Amino acid sequence: MENIIETKSFDFAVRIVNLYKYLTDTKKEFIISKQLLRSGTSIGANVAEAEQAQSRPDFISKMNIALKETSETKYWIKLLQATKYLSMEENSSIYADCVELEKLLVSIIKSSKQ
C-alpha cells in the first residue's frame, strides 16, 4: 500500500534538489538555495524517520519536525520569488506542493493525537 505522505515528500525533495541545481548553476545563487535544499529535503527525511518511530509520541514529534521544515521551506521559496531568483510561474507550482505537504502533515498530526 502506498504511503501518500512518504511519496509526496520524496517527490518534493527531488524537485527541491533540481531547483537547487538550477539556482546554483543558472542563477549563481548559493546562500538561500542551500537553506532551501536543507529544509526542503528534511521534510521527507523526517517523514521517513517517523515511519520507524518507537512510539506514538515519537511519531508525532518527527511529523511535527517535518511540519516545521515545511514552514521554513515555504519561507525560502517566497524569498527566492521576492528577490527575483524565481519567477511567479516557477514559484507557484513548487509553493503549491509545499502547501499540500503542510496540509497533509497537519492532518496526520491531528489524527495521530486522537
Image (cartoon, helix red, strand yellow):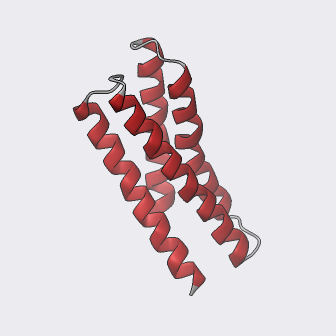
- Compared with 28, 97 (above or below) is below
The C terminus lies in quadrant: bottom right
Q: Name the image quarter holding residue 94.
A: top left
Percent x, y of residue 55: 74, 76
Q: What residue is at 57 percent from the left and 42 percent from the top?
A: 39
Q: Residue furthest right?
A: 54
Percent x, y of residue 24: 48, 16
User: Would you say 1 lies left or right of 89 here?
Assistant: right
User: Would you say 6 lies left or right of 98 here?
Assistant: right
Q: Name the image quarter holding residue 15.
A: top left
Percent x, y of residue 35: 57, 32
Q: Residue furthest bottom?
A: 114
- Compared with 13, 61 (above or below) is below
Percent x, y of residue 51: 64, 64
User: Would you say 64 lies left or right of 91 here?
Assistant: right
- Compared with 36, 52 (above or below) is below
Depth check, front residue: 98 or 32: 32
Give the total of numbered labels.
0
Q: What residue is at 72 percent from the left and 67 percent from the top?
A: 53
Q: What residue is at 24 percent from the left and 33 percent from the top?
A: 88
Q: Is residue 2 visible?
A: no
Q: Residue furthest left?
A: 89
Q: Is residue 16 visible?
A: yes
Depth check, front residue: 61 or 21: 61
Q: What residue is at 37 percent from the left and 54 percent from the top?
A: 99
